[in-house]
Image: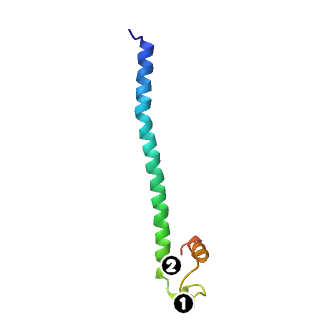
Amino acid sequence: MLTDTDTAYQVSRVISEAIAPAFLLGAVAAFISLLITRMNRIVDRVNIMIARPESDAGGRAHESRFTPTEFALEIDEPCD
């Protein structure tokens, strides 16, 4: 026959094993939300750069494309 202590331990173990995946799922959802927010910010910044007229390209009117380093530096600048 089980004692009250064993039963309480079993109940607490079942509850902790049932709740742990919920916390893990919540953490994964929050991380994915963070990544989506950052990707949206990058897309918005790229759209601003594409929509900018060539005369406002910061002296780069003669260039048709950025190098990867210039592109990364351009994205890093704050939005107007």
Q: Residue 22: percent from the left, percent from the top?
A: 41, 40
Q: Is residue 4 above or below residue 43?
A: above
Where is residue 53? Give x, y as percent: 49, 86
Question: What residue lies at 45% left-to-right and 36% top-to-bottom?
Answer: 20
Q: Position of residue 13 (x, y in %)?
A: 44, 25
**Residue sitting at x 41%, y 29%:** 15
Vertical order, 49 against 40 (above or below): below
As shown in the figure, which amino acid type bears the numbered disc 2?
Answer: Met
Q: Are marks 2 and 1 in contact (CB under 8 Å)?
A: no
Disc 1 is placed on an element classified as helix
Give whichever of 64, 29 is nearer the camera.
Answer: 64
Rate crowding at label 2 as few (under 14), some (14 to 19) or many (20 or more) other CA atoms within 10 Å: some
What kind of residue is marked 1?
Ser
Check disc 2 and report the residue beneath it: 49
Q: Position of residue 47 (x, y in %)?
A: 46, 76
Question: Which residue of the protein is positioned furthest toward the left in this rendering?
Answer: 1
Q: Give the CA distance from mark 2 to mark 1.
A: 12 Å
Note whether 68 is above or below 16 in the view shown: below
Q: Is residue 65 above or below residue 38?
A: below
Q: Residue at x 40, y 23 (%)?
A: 11
In the picture, the quarter occupied by the N terminus is: top left
Q: Which mark is residue 55?
A: 1
Q: Is residue 12 left or right of residue 71?
A: left
Lateral position of residue 43 relative to residue 72, left or right:
left
Q: Nearer the viewer, residue 77 or 66?
A: 66
Q: Which mark is drawn over residue 11?
A: none
Q: How many marks do you count on the picture? A: 2
Horizontal side of residue 36 vs 55, given as left or right: left
Give SS at disc 2. helix
Q: Residue furthest top?
A: 1
